[in-house]
Image (cartoon, rainbow, N blue to C red):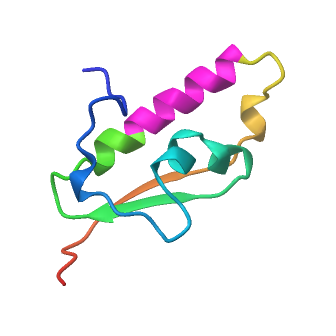
């Protein structure tokens, strides 16, 4: 199954203040060598989004002749937690 951000159910997603979906999908954190952490209840799409972003990143890297993949040092971390309020 092809994982992507298109058609993703964003209803359970919350972002840090001053940062949002467009920031994540722009992949700016990759070039800035920043980590991205997903956490939440089981079945909310953390792994789906991590795979979708990894595929998006790979496509961006290989489509740009000036990008050296070995220089990118971002990590995608997926954590599952109970997240009780």
* Quadrant of residue 66 within the rendered picture: top right
Q: Which residues are magenta?
A: 51-63
Is residue 53 in the magenta section? yes
Residue extending farthest right:
66
How many marks on residues? 0
Residue 71 % position (x, y): 78, 39
Left or right: where 37 falls relative to 60 = left
* Quadrant of residue 47 within the rendered picture: top left
Left or right: where 20 falls relative to 1 = right
Residue sitting at 66 percent across and 18 percent down? Answer: 62
Is residue 67 in the magenta section? no
Q: Nearer the viewer, residue 52 or 5?
A: 5
Residue sitting at 51 percent across and 29 percent down? Answer: 56
For the stretch drawn in magenta, the main secondary structure is: helix
Residue 51 % position (x, y): 39, 36
Left or right: where 75 falls relative to 42 = right
Residue sitting at 79 percent across and 28 percent down? Answer: 68
Residue sitting at 24 percent across and 20 percent down? Answer: 1
Residue 38 % position (x, y): 38, 59
Q: Quadrant of the C terminus?
A: bottom left
Above or below, 85 relative to 81: below
Residue extending farthest bottom:
85
Above or below, 18 relative to 59: below
């Amino acid at each position: 199954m092809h994982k992507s951000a298109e058609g993703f159910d964003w209803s359970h997603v919350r972002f840090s203040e001053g940062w949002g979906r467009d920031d994540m999908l722009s992949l700016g954190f990759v070039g800035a060598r920043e980590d991205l952490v997903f956490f939440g209840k089981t079945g909310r799409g953390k792994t789906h989004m991590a795979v979708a972003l990894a595929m998006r990143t790979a496509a961006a890297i290989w489509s740009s002749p000036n990008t050296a993949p070995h220089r990118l040092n971002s990590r995608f971390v997926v954590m599952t937690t109970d997240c009780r309020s």
